[in-house]
Structures are given as C-alpha cells and as structure tokens.
Amino acid sequence: MTDRFSLHGKRAIVTGASRGIGRAIALGFADAGADVALVSRKLEGLQAVAKEIEDRTPQRSLPIAAHMGRPADVDRMVEEVVSQWGAIDILVNNAGTNPVMGPLMDMDPAAWDKIMDVNLKGPYLASVRVARAMVERGEGGKIINISSGASLDPAPMLGAYSISKAALNHLTRVLAKECGHAKICVNAIAPGLIETAFAAALIQNPAIHQGVVRQTPLGRHGQPDEIVGAALFLASSASDFITGQVVVVDGGVHM
Ligand SMILES: NC(=O)c1ccc[n+]([C@@H]2O[C@H](COP(=O)([O-])OP(=O)(O)OC[C@H]3O[C@@H](n4cnc5c(N)ncnc54)[C@H](OP(=O)(O)O)[C@@H]3O)[C@@H](O)[C@H]2O)c1
C-alpha cells in the first residue's frame, strides 16, 4: 500500500518553490521520488532548493524564474519543463500573493488586479496548459492548487485575497469536472496559518496570532512541512478516486 504514495518516475512543477510551503512540497516530492521543476520569480532561492534536492536525493530539479502573474512566463515555464523532461505528471499552483491588508473600499484597484493575476489567472493558465498536455499524452495527471482557509470564510481586511482563493476553489472544481474523463485529478489544499515569510505579519501581531490560536482546536499555528502529507497524497496514486476537493489543513479551524 505504501507504494501508492510513491512519486517515483513522476515529473512535477511546484510554483513558489523557493521558500515556505512551496519549498516544503518540492522537497517532499523529491524525497518521494519525483523530479521537480522549481518555479518562482527569483532564481537565487530556487537554486538553493535545487542544491538541497541534489544533496538528499538522486532526483532531478529544474529551477525556472517565472512570474505567475505574467501569461508569457507561465507559457515559458510549461514549455521548458516539457522540452527538458518530455512531460508533466503533477502541477502544484502554490505561488500566491497578498500585497495589501485593509477594507475593500480603501483598496487600490491595481492591488486587486495583482492579486487576481498571481493567485487566480496564473493558476488558471498553468492548469489549462498542463491539462492540455496531459490530455494529449493520455496518461492522466494531478493538479493541486494551494488555496487558503480564507477561501472558506469572507476575510475582512484580506478581502481580495480571500475572493481570489474562493475563486481558485471553484477553478479546481470546474477543471475537475472538465478533465475527469482524461484521468486528471484536480484538487486544492486550504492551509490555515502557517509559519512562513508570507504570514510573518500575522504571526508577529500578538492580537491576530492569539485570535487565530484561540479558534484552532489544535491550539497553534502550522509549519510548512505539515502541508506536505496532503500534497503528497493528492499528487500520488493513493488519491486516484479523489477530485474536485478542497482539503483543509488548518488544525481544525474549519470543520
Ligand atoms: N503561510 C500561510 O499562513 C498561508 C495560509 C494559507 C494559504 N497560503 C498560501 O500558500 C501559498 C504559499 O505561501 P507561503 O506562505 O509559503 O509564502 P512564502 O513563504 O512567502 O513563499 C511564496 C513563494 O511564492 C513565490 N512567489 C511570490 N510571488 C510570485 C509570483 N508572482 N510568481 C512566481 N512566484 C511567486 C516566492 O518566491 P519569489 O519571491 O522568488 O517569487 C516564494 O517562493 C500561497 O498561495 C499562499 O496564499 C499560505
């Protein structure tokens, strides 16, 4: 049964792989036997993760600098992996952004565009490019979108972000319906508060942090490594009959 969690021989793309949750997923996938294309805007951080993969596994890694809010970069990312490795078995849309906190009424519409471009349009473009290649190849595949607990409740002060992630959940379900015939499983993971650079402002604010911890049955925030098990499950054949789901990994905040 444990073989069903193996990613041996699989080729994965993980966006936002230079740090935080994306780095943890990339390392976890390499440990499970996958070759991993590592994507983010800055090559330097990706090269450090590639070195970690090289030091601990025999797997290949492929650092690619690409901005998920730029359609031409998304195309180039997919083309590069297909041309280097022949095919893509797993796509993890993990890169995300939230440049502002505050009420929607005060938000600059440019910030709305940036959030939607990176959190929603990038994953949409990457997913359809990768899904087309998977359909053509005829061997199925796995697409995983990293959503957020904020997709499940309207989050005041994080309004555009929570809207982008709610839409990402629906993108997950629509693609799951459209791609199921080709054995492509499309699922999402909704993490709670996880200790990364992205969440530093929330974790370092005692009032916000204590508020989250109080609502969390497990009584703490999470670590990036704690997202890896769900990602590995959804990327592997252990989850072959699961699609269109949002798996919540948040210490029990949402039940
Ligand atoms: N941490 C949390 O509490 C939490 C909770 C729920 C959901 N999430 C979601 O989890 C995902 C990962 O977040 P994290 O906490 O791990 O953040 P993080 O530690 O700040 O890492 C973000 C990663 O995304 C890359 N990135 C940022 N903007 C990008 C862009 N436009 N194009 C390509 N890559 C980009 C960053 O590298 P570069 O700077 O090199 O581009 C970095 O590798 C996000 O989708 C976030 O919404 C996080």
Image (spheres, helix red, strand yellow):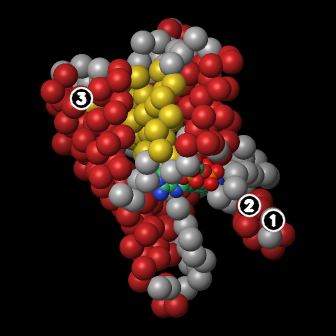
Residue placed most toward the observer, 207 or 195: 195
Q: Is residue 92 left or right of residue 122?
A: right
Q: Residue at x 35, y 21 (%)?
A: 85
Residue type at numbered disc 2: Ala
Residue 4 x, y percent position in the rendering: 47, 13
Task: Count the marks.
Answer: 3
Residue 189 x, y percent position in the rendering: 50, 45
Mark 1 Cβ and ligand 1 under 8 Å apart? no
Residue placed most toward the observer, 72 or 36: 72
The mark nearer the N terminus, 3 or 2, is 3
Question: How many residues crowd around disc 2 within 10 Å: few (fewer than 14), some, or many (20 or more)?
Answer: few
Q: Is residue 137 left or right of residue 186?
A: left
Q: Using the image, determine if residue 139 lies above or below residue 130.
A: above
Q: Are dots 2 and 1 in contact, CB under 8 Å?
A: yes
Q: Quadrant of residue 183?
A: top left
Question: How many residues crowd around disc 1 within 10 Å: few (fewer than 14), some, or many (20 or more)?
Answer: few
Q: Are dots 3 and 2 in contact, CB under 8 Å?
A: no
Q: Is residue 184 visible?
A: yes
Q: Secondary structure at mark 3?
A: helix
Residue 98 x, y percent position in the rendering: 55, 67
Q: Secondary structure at mark 2?
A: helix
* Res 204 label: 1
Q: Which residue is mark 2?
A: 200
- Give the residue at the far front of this rendering: 44
- Give the residue at the far bottom of this rendering: 105
The mark nearer the N terminus, 1 or 3, is 3
Q: Which residue is mark 3?
A: 134
Residue type at numbered disc 3: Met
* Res 81 label: none
Residue type at numbered disc 1: Gln
Q: Using the image, determine if residue 229 lies above or below residue 146.
A: above
